Image (cartoon, coloured by chain):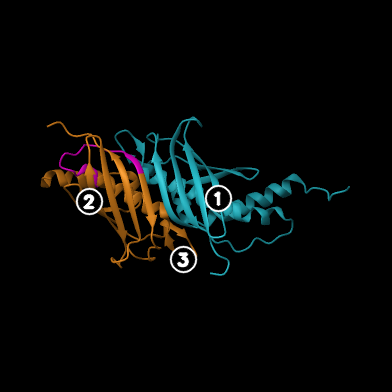
Amino acid sequence: MSRPRPEPVQVVKQRRDAALAALVARVPYIQFLGVTFDRRGDELTAIMHYDDKLIGNPMLPAIHGGATAAFLETTAIIELGWNQIWQEIETEGNELPPLRLPRTIDFTVDYLRSGLPRDAYARARINRVGRRYASVHVEAWQDNRDKLFAQATGHFMMPQLND
Amino acid sequence: MTADKAKLAAQFIEAIPHSRALGMKLTGIGDGEATIEMPYSEKLIGDPETGVIHGGAVSALMDTCSGAAVMSHPDGPRATATIDLRIDYMRAATPGQTIRTRAYCYHVTRAVAFVRAEAVDDDADRPVATATGAFTFERSKA
């Protein structure tokens, strides 16, 4: 039994990071929110870097529920987009196909605690993705992974190759 | 709601940093109902291929408008927090057009306000999105 020699780690990382950066850079609103993505293998963690413009209640102060919702929705969409291109990224010498992002059908957010004025993190789990529809769950926390400050479930329409 | 209270609420909402960053303008408020609009802006784009605004910006608009409706309720609280908010996206908002939202409290209990909201663009007959939410509601002392 022989198998081809695996690619050098830097080459693999460079290709994955470039694909992720290209995906994230496509969405101007992600830049506006100040969200970035951390990658470990295929696992993504979204980070919403604290900024004063995210505040919804200046008295507390607390992060705006709308900013939290947008953060969770963005995390879900990027996770779906990432999941779609992962196989292509992993195939050596493959050109990435033109990328189309999923469209949100509905999105439901549970607000569990008020968002503190500091960085927030989120991870999405794809519960099901078919040819047309996908269902995704997202969890967000701040200091403590076990103490979620918000979670959400959303349904998405997957982009069709021919429309 | 008195004119003073309405003015106060308008100022309060326009003082919310995130709502200001999104360019929201309160256009009406009172008796558990509020209307807010958000002009089109390139920084809010979710899909550059179409120029359509990101769903997250619409969520923020719905959330702000719903919160404003709760605060304007006659028995209403000085502050409120979102317990849960569901948004249904009916269609893409037309690029370049202002999005207008109306939210109203359709039921309030001792502790919770139930709110519905609808967002439209220039074609007001076909909603862009609708929302239903539950908000904390602490009655002001009589």
For marks 2 and 1, give the one nearer the viewer.
1
Of the numbered discs in the image, which one, if any, rests on residue A156?
none
Compute the Cα span from label 2 to label 3: 30 Å
Q: Report the residue at 38% width, 66% height from top.
A: B94
Residue A30 locus on image (x, y percent): 47, 51
Given the image, on which type of amino acid does mark 2 rest? Ala
Compute the Cα span from label 3 to label 1: 26 Å
What residue is pinned by disc 2? B34
Q: Report the residue at 72% width, 55% height from top.
A: A91
Chain label for disc 1: A
Chain label for disc 2: B
For residue A152, above or below residue A104: above
For marks 3 and 1, give the one nearer the viewer.
1
What residue is pinned by disc 1? A128
Picture quarter containing residue B1? top left
Viewer-proximal residue among B48 and B94? B94
What residue is pinned by disc 3? B50
Residue A88 locus on image (x, y percent): 67, 57
Compute the Cα span from label 2 to label 1: 37 Å
Look at chain B in the picture and name its colour. Answer: orange
Look at chain A in the picture and name its colour. Answer: cyan
Query: Does the segment drawn in magenta span residue B81?
Result: yes
